[in-house]
Image (cartoon, rainbow, N blue to C red):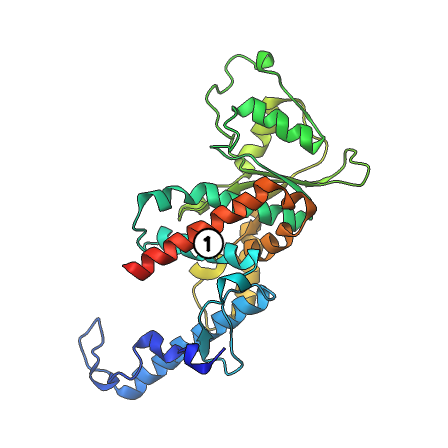
Amino acid sequence: MSESSLIGLHNLYGGESDTSSDPEPETGDVLDESILDSVQEQFVQAVVEEILYRDRVLHGHYPFVVKPRGVLLAHPKNEEQLTTGEWVYLFCLLCSAIREDGLQAESAALTKRIPALFQMCSCLAAAGYLSGSVSSFGFPRAEGNAFLPALRLAYKNFGEGTVRSDSDVPPGSPSQLKDGGIDVIAWKDFPDRLPGKLYLLGQCASGKNWRGKTVKTYVAPLHGNWFVGHPPSDPINAMFIPFTFHHELQDREDVDFLSLLRTTFHSETFTFGVIHDRLRIAYFAEIGSGLPQCQEVDMQENISLIQNWVREVLNAVRES
């Protein structure tokens, strides 16, 4: 890739601008140029560190190229070079920008497709995380089937638990359930496929209000109300979000970034279970896409739908 295809990070704050006359926004006072330079340097340094962090934790599946000099960011790779993990990263990046009003989707149809497509991304990631199998259970389901038939099918494939029949639903039970708060069911079998498995129940939250949700609220009602014999394996609770988990963290002078991130993950895991953010989803979606069970036609079609959505959004941005 040529140097002419690179973007200098100084362009993030306007390139060669005359900073000596920029007023301070709260007081209106003109700031000393050296102070502004220091602020800009801190900003650029933070951006560089963030880019390098993302590149490092994605282990080769960051869809941009970071140059050793650390102040240049490459344009996205050609499409044929992008891995599934990189496509998923781009989807989550654009989804986050739309949800946070940083990017205006030209078509309401593009926004409407986000939840279903994000669930596809999450299923790939869940399969990759467990190196196992996955069932996309969130509503609306591709098969269009109702709650109990869909639940029976998912747990027949899982191989644990006995779901109630339609005629065995106790009076007073919810009558209009869509997914019971569960979007992703994933598991890892032993070769004998007998009970005793890694078992994951996940919720997908593509909106900014994801902290108002937790799959832990729904696990006990799911097993208690809809099974005559619930699975003997204890589930791993999981939350899937398209945002980077650390994007809301406030810098602190007394704590370094990684220590703060570790402490926050530790705290929030008690509430949400295993949190799969954009970086984790992209990494494990790449692994999931290579599993035999994810090579089936319907899963490959899902990957194509994700790719097409990313292309549509990028084309809309270019044309706006």
Residue 182 in view here? yes
- The residue nearer to you, when weighing 45 against 257, is 45
> What residue appears at the point 31 percent right and 84 percent down from the top-left corner?
35
- The residue nearer to you, when weighing 165 against 311, is 311
When the figure is inspected, residue 269 is found, relative to residue 44, above or below; the finding is: above
> What residue appears at the point 43 percent right and 50 percent down from the top-left corner?
309
On the image, the x and y values in percent for residue 249 come to 45, 61
Which amino acid is tagged 1? Phe
Answer with the quarter of the image where residue 152 lies.
top right
* Disc 1: which residue: 91
Question: Which residue of the protein is positioned furthest toward the left in this rendering?
Answer: 28
When the figure is inspected, residue 56 is found, relative to residue 68, above or below; the finding is: above
Question: Which residue of the protein is positioned furthest toward the right in this rendering?
Answer: 192
On the image, the x and y values in percent for residue 288 come to 63, 50
Secondary-structure class at tag 1: helix
> What residue appears at the point 58 percent right and 28 percent down from the top-left corner?
222
| Circle 1 crowding by C-alpha within 10 Å: few under 14, some 14–19, many from 20 | many
On the image, the x and y values in percent for residue 262 come to 57, 61
- The residue nearer to you, when weighing 249 against 131, is 131
Quarter the C terminus occupies: bottom left
Answer with the quarter of the image where residue 57 lies.
bottom right
Residue 272 in view here? no
When the figure is inspected, residue 39 is found, relative to residue 241, above or below; the finding is: below
Count the numbered circles shown: 1
On the image, the x and y values in percent for residue 119 come to 51, 43
